[in-house]
Image (cartoon, grey):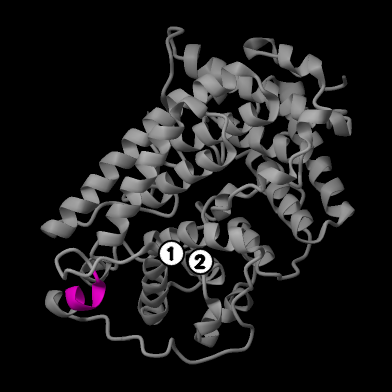
Amino acid sequence: MISLDCPPADVPDDRWMALAIGTGCDLIEIIRHGGPSGNSLDAGVVYVAHNDVFSLSHTRGGDLLSGAGGIAVVLAELSALSGVDSFGEEAVRQADIAIGACTVLSEEMDRWSGAPSDVPVNGMYTGLASSLYCLKFLARIGGVQTASEAISTAIAQSEESLVAFDFETAFASNGWLQVAPVASLLAVLSSEATYMAGDGAPVGSEVEGSLSGIRTDTSCSDTSCSQAGGNKRAGNELSLSELRDRLAEIIVANWGKYFPAFPINPVMSDLFPSERAMAILALSRHADPTRMVLPHQMVNWLDQASEPASADRLIAISLGKKLPDPAVPSTSLGCINVIEERLLSYRYDANGRQLASAREIGTMLAGRKESYGRWFPEAVLPDRYRLSAMWGLAAVAHAFAGLGDPRRWCSMRLLEYPDVKQSTIKATLPPSSELLHGEAFRGEHLTG
């Protein structure tokens, strides 16, 4: 990507939510009328997990990275914060797509456990882990009340499929496409547990060894794996709490075989934590981390990276690591990454300098739109194909909402849930911001 320098916009502290709403309206306009012939658009640059490539295609159901699930989350968040009706209406439509995807993915897992063949394709932000996270996020924040019953039903169906899934056999077959899906599922299931209990204690700092009593032999037969796995065919279905324990055991037992060393694919490092980092994040949130005894390589993972990737830096911060300030970004995606990092740091220790730094980068991001008429002027494809909740227009809206209400903000990349009780934005939202919509948003309201 090329670097496009431009002057920052002048954004007062009380105008960030107006920017979030304006960007959300841009997003709705693009989805409904942004196609080449003015038709509705449900296509964009999507990530194909099993090929590790991006392509221009239909957005994928419940996916957080490239799909309707992530878009639904951001629009529902804006609806809950602002009360703008169009956000809730479109969030419901996108949530319906996410619900359908979650249903299909649950059925795939059910079929695999009944007669193992090809393991369902899942990734860190794609597949059932991502879909379940999106639905749980929607259930928490509201904003899609008309779809709440369907969301609850889809969550129940997904959890039922998970507790019956034969993880042991799937993992023994091919590592279930390595371990990112296992770590992501554990992160989703454990995040809610630690959220309800307060801040989760980080995994230990100087421990060694292996998880007590856990089998470390990864070359088991289907029979032995089924007996240990606790699935429908073994007649021993797990509870969600037991599933969290089992997923944690799988990660620790197979650490040496399936977790690659640094670095990961540098092209993806801005978006994806390494599988190693994601696994450590998941274990740090585990419902009972005190019973974990971890290999020292797992605890000291950050020391093995001379320069941790952007997404890995987020995990390091969430585990209490102190890192040097990030480099000044030269692209819009870089701005989003740094805003996310600074907001996460602020949330953990409420350092005003970190929030000020995040807002400074936010003025750079807003300035790019003001100067070039696009949020991603360095990209080859126009903004209308960048719909993602993590690297597109939805990500921009989510970042601005965080700059306006940092106490409520959460990092979707870390599969976190927002603290809805912390929100104060409704009381301070400028009434004029509700008038912003679609193509009318060109940055003219940036200076108030």
Q: Where is residue 252 in the image (x, y as percent from the top left)?
A: 42, 79
Instruction: Indicate the quadrant containing the N terminus: top left, top right, bottom left or bottom right.
Output: top right
Residue at 44 percent across and 29 percent down: it is 147
> Is the stretch drawn in magenta largely helix, strand or loop?
helix
Instruction: Indicate the quadrant containing the C terminus: top left, top right, bottom left or bottom right.
Output: top right
- At label 1, counting other C-alpha atoms closer than 10 Å, the crowd grade (few under 14, some 14-19, many 20 or more) is many
Which amino acid type corresponds to the residue marked 1 in the rendered image?
Ala
Q: Position of residue 370 (x, y in %)?
A: 76, 22
Image height of 407 relative to 228, above or below: above
Check residue 227 for magenta coloring. yes
Residue 392 is marked as: none
Residue range corresponding to the magenta coloring: 225-230
- For the view shown, which residue lies furthest in the top direction? 37
Q: Quadrant of residue 245?
A: bottom left
Question: In the shown orientation, is residue 212 left or right of residue 371?
Answer: left
For the residues labelled 1 and 2, the Cα–Cα distance comes to 6 Å
Residue at 44 percent across and 12 percent down: it is 36
- For the view shown, which residue lies furthest in the front direction? 149
Check residue 214 for magenta coloring. no
Q: Where is residue 186 in the image (x, y as percent from the top left)?
A: 44, 63
Question: In the shown orientation, is residue 372 left or right of residue 116?
Answer: right
The reply to whether the C-beta atoms of the residues labelled 1 and 2 are less than 8 Å apart is yes
Q: On the image, numbered disc 1 is attached to which residue?
A: 183
Q: Quadrant of residue 235?
A: bottom left
Residue 195 in sight in this render: yes
Residue at 12 percent across and 77 percent down: it is 223
- At label 2, counting other C-alpha atoms closer than 10 Å, the crowd grade (few under 14, some 14-19, many 20 or more) is many
Residue 282 is marked as: 2
Residue 309 in sight in this render: no
Which amino acid type corresponds to the residue marked 2 in the rendered image?
Ala
Which numbered disc flags the more N-terminal residue, 1 or 2? Answer: 1
